[in-house]
Image (cartoon, rainbow, N blue to C red):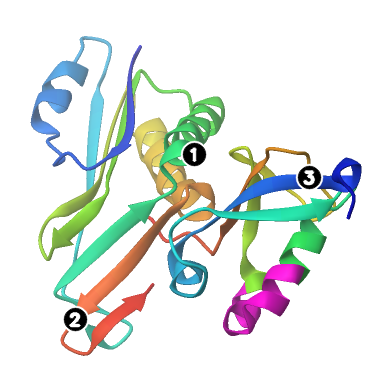
């Protein structure tokens, strides 16, 4: 099984991961990119500054992946969350899940996103023409 | 407090809470046997502007989520974590 889990400032590049996950037993390779959009809650967004509790974020993201694999076993999984100042259009989150059939891949990826939003200590500071606001 | 009854922790604040407590670690002393709930109450007294956010925060001690009844130990790293918003 291939497993890549990381919170950090590096740009997210999923192309090589998708290729690496396309192994013969996998009939489904699912990729999700979370992208910085230009609005949130009625405010214009120009960029988002993502901060994290460095010492804990990677550990919690690993725990999220453990829980999701226990609930939805798949062949390969990658979850990358970027930190730092990201402009509109840049990817903040990348997920690649490969499995024999599509149902496990969709279920696993959906659970990963839901769980990240509950426990991984990462925060958005949205930046727009009317100033900065915590999401 | 006598030396025997004091423990020292390092407090970290994140997200919106860092607007009030700063983003550098704070050193705080507590009586032996103090709990996370005692720390939160004291933060609320010393940083009144942060008071409204505290009930929504989770707490981690030494990078593990804990409940407010958790008893603090000397040298603990305590983090106050507002609702996370990754993704």
The x, y position of residue B33, in whole percent, is 90, 47
Q: Chain of mark 1?
A: A
Residue drawn at (19%, 58%), measured in percent from left and top? A85
Residue B7 marker: 3
Looking at the rendered structure, whether the residues under marks 2 and 3 are on a common chain is answered as no
The region drawn magenta spans: B42-53
**Relative vertical location of residue A38 with respect to residue A49 in this rendering, above or below:** below
Q: Disc 3: which chain?
A: B
Marks 3 and 2: in contact by CB < 8 Å? no
Per the image, label 2 sits on a secondary structure element best described as: strand
Left or right of B52? Residue A88 is: left
Q: Which residue occupies the foreground of this view, A45 or B73? A: B73
Q: Residue at x 35, y 11 (%)?
A: A1
- A74 over A118 or under it: above or below: above
Q: Is residue B10 visible?
A: yes
| Structural crowding at the residue carrying mark 3, measured as other residues with C-alpha within 10 Å and reported as few (<14), some (14–19) or many (≥20) | some
Residue at 68 percent of width and 56 percent of height = B28
Image mark for residue A128: 2
Q: Please name the predominant secondary structure of the magenta segment in the image.
A: helix
- Residue tagged by mark 1? A56
Q: Nearer the viewer, residue B10 or A71?
A: B10
Residue A26: which disc? none
Above or below, comparing residue B86 to residue A57 in the picture = below
Task: Report the Cα–Cα distance between label 1 and label 2.
Answer: 29 Å
The reply to whether residue B32 is visible in this rendering is no
Residue A18 found in image quarter: top left
What residue do we see at 77% from left, 51% from top?
B67
Q: Residues within 10 Å of mark 2 (few under 14, many from 20)?
A: some
Alpha carbon separation for disc pair 2 and 3: 43 Å
């Amino acid at each position: 099984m291939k497993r890549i889990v990381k919170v950090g400032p590096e740009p997210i590049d999923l192309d090589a991961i998708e290729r690496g996950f396309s192994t013969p037993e996998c009939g489904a390779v699912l990729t999700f990119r979370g992208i910085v959009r230009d609005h949130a809650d009625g405010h214009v967004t120009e960029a988002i500054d993502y901060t994290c509790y460095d010492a804990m974020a990677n550990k919690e993201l690993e725990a999220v992946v453990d829980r999701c694999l226990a609930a939805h076993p798949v062949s390969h999984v990658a979850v990358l969350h970027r930190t730092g100042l990201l402009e509109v259009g840049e990817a903040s989150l990348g997920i690649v899940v490969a499995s024999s059939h599509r149902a496990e891949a969709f279920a696993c990826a959906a659970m990963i996103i839901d769980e990240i939003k509950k426990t991984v200590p990462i925060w958005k500071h949205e930046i727009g023409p009317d100033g900065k606001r915590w999401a | 407090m006598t030396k025997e009854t004091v423990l020292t922790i390092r407090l970290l604040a994140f997200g919106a809470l860092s607007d009030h407590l700063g983003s550098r670690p704070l050193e705080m002393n507590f009586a032996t046997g103090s709990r996370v709930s005692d720390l939160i109450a004291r933060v609320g007294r010393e940083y009144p502007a942060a008071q409204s956010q505290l009930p929504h925060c989770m707490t981690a001690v030494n990078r593990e989520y804990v409940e407010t009844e958790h008893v603090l130990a000397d040298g603990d790293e305590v983090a106050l974590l507002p609702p996370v918003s990754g993704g």
